[in-house]
């Protein structure tokens, strides 16, 4: 499954170079991730209520063309790796108008509990694990 | 007591107009507030550990001259009103280079507990109340 | 005309109190403002291309109930005052789920040129002025 | 040369997990970068006035321990690669209190002009090029 979510670049996102500030792309990755999970049947809000959090351990972005104010951006997100203790998401950002690839990246997340201690999702939340596993398999 | 804290405008703070984005001034107000409390002998971190939080109920900013990338800004903060249940901070921002007033504003905060329920600071945390009260008197 | 725009609270918007950080409401006001202009037939991007910018001179927010992660928020925006040199927008934020009013506020903007010098919109851009004026009249 | 810059974690930087939001580390990288340049004798503000901009082409962060509200963080920054057209910065973040490594990362920047077109810094701005080159050599 690849989730596609459309967002619009806001003035707040730009910097004085007239383009989107580099750090803000990671906010969009979050949007893609949360919406992919929602499409998989997992509300990140409910995940946290059940005591499962995902701590980011790595984040990477490759910037290809600058995103600009008022651009509509399609965030495409999928799961590319999964183990009992971590999950890796891959993202690509395209400008809607001309389908230009603007950026791509990935983030790695460790499953942790409320106190940010690593957990095995498989051992602690079998039902959630199976939802994640279904996705990861689809990507192989 | 008036707390003076020096910050520098970062690229991240600017927008494509070439000046600091209006919403970011409220982040600076937070810096002023936390540093005033520190100077008063109150660590906001410890305040939260003791179960006291301050929920913002109003925020206002008057923008006078634009702040720009790499400017050094002096944030001046003081308490202007205090009741058992709320506190009002007043801020002014000056450019260090020429002492130009850039903005001024205020925020009103309600004392709340961990569940964001209003509390009387006077009734629940007498020692903290007295530290706040000392400041508010000084401003009259 | 009252523009209604739906947004979703993102993790990035929250702070360690578990609710949306106060400064972020002003980012939502921007979204409301830009979408109201779009509905009025004015692209803020094009406005800037024509050399018209709107510098914020005042911003105010009254926080009523905290917005939380994953909430869907309806931003309602309208123009409440207009002169040749400035425009005032009024905002209200409701949680979509139960229509609870979360916050309301306003911002005042001065029409300026590329160098952030005040201009009379009426004198310099008659067609834009008429679009704004149409709205302001509707609100009286 | 390794630049060390001290910053403090602000409430705004945290998210509802009670730690600093992942995207905000890239804002700190910017601070480190700008302060390293300043220590090298290059004001990023002046760089832009001369028509030299640095467009981010890659950004990476490895998160080791969470940064928390009110932590003082030492940002260490150095240049690890340089060509005529691009420069790579490396960052490490330590908590001041106990020198715990919190994160490390790098960013790659392309030298561009006002229109975000790549330039050879060596060909266009010899004096700046020499300042950069001096640093890069020191790191070998």
Image (cartoon, coloured by chain):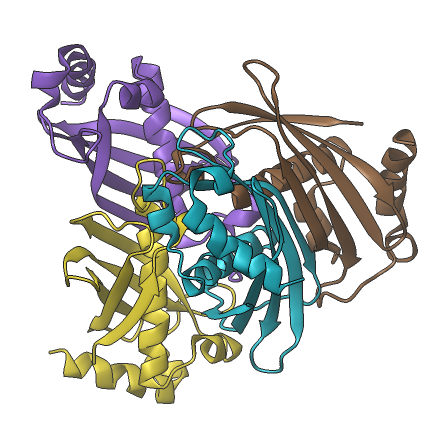
Chain colours: A purple, B cyan, C brown, D yellow
Image location of residue A118, percent across then percent down: 12, 33
Please state which of residues A127 and A113 is positioned toward the viewer in this rendering: A113
Which quadrant holds residue B99? bottom right
Residue B25 is at least partly visible in this image: yes
Please state which of residues B22 and D53 is positioned toward the viewer in this rendering: B22
Please state which of residues D71 and C122 is positioned toward the viewer in this rendering: D71
Judged from this view, the residue extending furthest toward the top is A127
The residue sitting at 26% across, 51% down in the picture is: D67
Residue D131 drawn above or below residue A62: below
The residue sitting at 53% across, 59% down in the picture is: B134
Image location of residue C44, percent across then percent down: 69, 45
Image location of residue A22, percent across then percent down: 39, 53
Residue A132 drawn above or below residue C124: above
Residue A80 drawn above or below residue C33: above
Total residue callouts: 0
- Left/right placement of residue B134 relative to residue A133 reads right
Image location of residue A1, percent across then percent down: 27, 19
In the picture, the quarter occupied by the C terminus of chain A is: top left
- Left/right placement of residue C135 relative to residue A25 reads right
Residue B20 is at least partly visible in this image: no
Which quadrant holds residue D37? bottom left
- Left/right placement of residue A107 relative to residue C58 reads left
The residue sitting at 20% across, 15% down in the picture is: A128
- Left/right placement of residue D106 relative to residue B51 reads left
Residue A131 drawn above or below residue D111: above
């Amino acid at each position: 499954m690849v989730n596609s979510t459309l967002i619009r670049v806001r003035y707040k996102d730009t910097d004085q170079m007239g383009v989107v500030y580099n750090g803000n792309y990671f906010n969009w990755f979050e949007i893609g991730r949360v919406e992919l999970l929602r499409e998989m049947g997992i509300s990140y809000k409910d995940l946290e209520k059940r005591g499962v959090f995902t701590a980011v351990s790595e984040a990477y972005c490759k910037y290809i063309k600058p995103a600009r104010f008022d651009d509509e951006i399609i965030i495409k997100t999928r799961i590319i790796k999964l183990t009992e203790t971590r999950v890796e998401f891959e993202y690509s950002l395209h400008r809607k108008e001309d389908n230009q690839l603007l950026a791509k990246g990935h983030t790695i997340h460790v499953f942790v509990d409320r106190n940010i201690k690593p957990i095995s999702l498989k051992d602690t939340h079998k039902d959630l694990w199976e939802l994640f596993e279904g996705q990861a398999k689809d990507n192989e």
